[in-house]
Image (cartoon, helix red, strand yellow):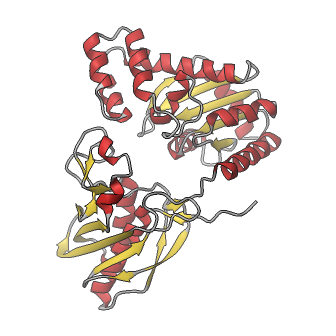
Amino acid sequence: MKQLREGYTTGSCAAAASMASVLWQVKGECPKWVTLETPSGKCLNLPITAKTPFRCGVKKDGGDDPDETNGCMVIAQVDIGNKNGEISFAAGPGVGIVTRKGLKIPVGEPAINPVPRKMIKDAVRSVIGQKKAKVTISVEDGEKIAEKTFNGRLGIQGGISILGTTGIVRPMSEEAVRESLQLELSMCRKEYGDACALVTGYTGETYLCQQYGRNSKAIILCSNYLGYLLDCAEEMAFHYILLVGCPGKLVKPAADIMNLHSHTAGGQREVICTHAALAGASNEEVRMLYNCNTTIQMQELLQELSIKEKVWNSIVASVCENCRKRTHGKLQIGMILINEKNTVLAESANIQKIRREWFRCSTN
């Protein structure tokens, strides 16, 4: 099978362009390349395109997983202050502004996600130390690109979002991903035993490592392929599966949605509203939940309601039951539902046993 080529995110582009902008100002010459360390630990050597003075661009390369932003030019201009202070952000042409609650960035702020913001700050600080600075990020043709994304539905107006949690774009050819996940699960079975944790993202993995030690093993990042990995786990004679993740993806199996990709199905709003109604929410409360823009906003609203624990516990029970049916009753499924801050929202009734069996294998 062909080895697929990795790329880098718009967040990496913005950080590298910002570093180039301050290097140009400090050294008097625009660098041709900058070296950027990504959150994943990989270093990128990215070519810089000099625009007008102190405005630097980096061209996005999605590798063999191109999306709508592939090939776009991300531009940064950094205005350096004379005194020490904070680094602030501004949206130039082609970068969106957050206009609705429920996202990771407050209303009125540029749509530059938290991890890219930290990458940019780290890159700028590596050159100017603690000086105050204002970073303006632009994207050429960003408004046109945004029309092909979900930004408008999420309340991001005027351009694209600057995204990325690892700085690296990993190829997502379905055949390649399935083969890779199957191999990883098979190795997990042989090396660690009959229990495994499936996490839907790095938040779940971080939670397990924080709770049970950095050297925790038997963890598979299943991404969107929960149903496929459950099928594989049944074939490989696993006995215990621990699911860990956030509501954005992990409430979907409560509706028997086992491919968690947003292009396959949504359903989070309908799942949460249904279980809220079953838990005794009023018509008005269900309506308020239904009108929420994002799953995060629904979580915030539920936090104010007395039924919140019943809702999350009911969803977790449904997810576990549907996953158990998917594996024909051969696997025992436990689940820990967390939010983006690693706070536990709910756990399955059998969590102590499942966690104990997973920990046994994880520390094997």
Query: Is residue 192 left or right of 220 when viewed as pictured?
Result: right
Q: Residue at x 38, y 59 (%)?
A: 116
- Examine the image and state in which quarter residue 297 appears: top left
Q: Position of residue 100 (x, y in %)?
A: 24, 41
Q: Is residue 241 above or below residue 329?
A: below
- Examine the image and state in which quarter residue 56 appears: bottom left
Q: Quadrant of the N terminus?
A: bottom right
The number of numbered discs placed on residues in the rendered structure image is 0
Q: For this rendering, which residue is in front, 129 or 348? A: 348
Q: Is residue 244 above or below residue 108?
A: above
Residue 359 in view of the camera:
no
Q: Position of residue 89 (x, y in %)?
A: 24, 62
Q: Quadrant of the C terminus?
A: top right
Q: Residue at x 67, y 21 (%)?
A: 324
- Examine the image and state in which quarter residue 198 appears: top right
Q: For this rendering, which residue is in front, 338 or 224? A: 224
Q: Is residue 329 above or below residue 218?
A: above
**Hey, which residue is sitting farthest bottom in the picture?**
28
Residue 118 in view of the camera:
yes
Q: Residue at x 29, y 91 (%)?
A: 28
Q: Residue at x 80, y 32 (%)?
A: 235
Query: Is residue 332 left or right of 171 when viewed as pictured?
Result: right
Q: Position of residue 120 (x, y in %)?
A: 36, 66
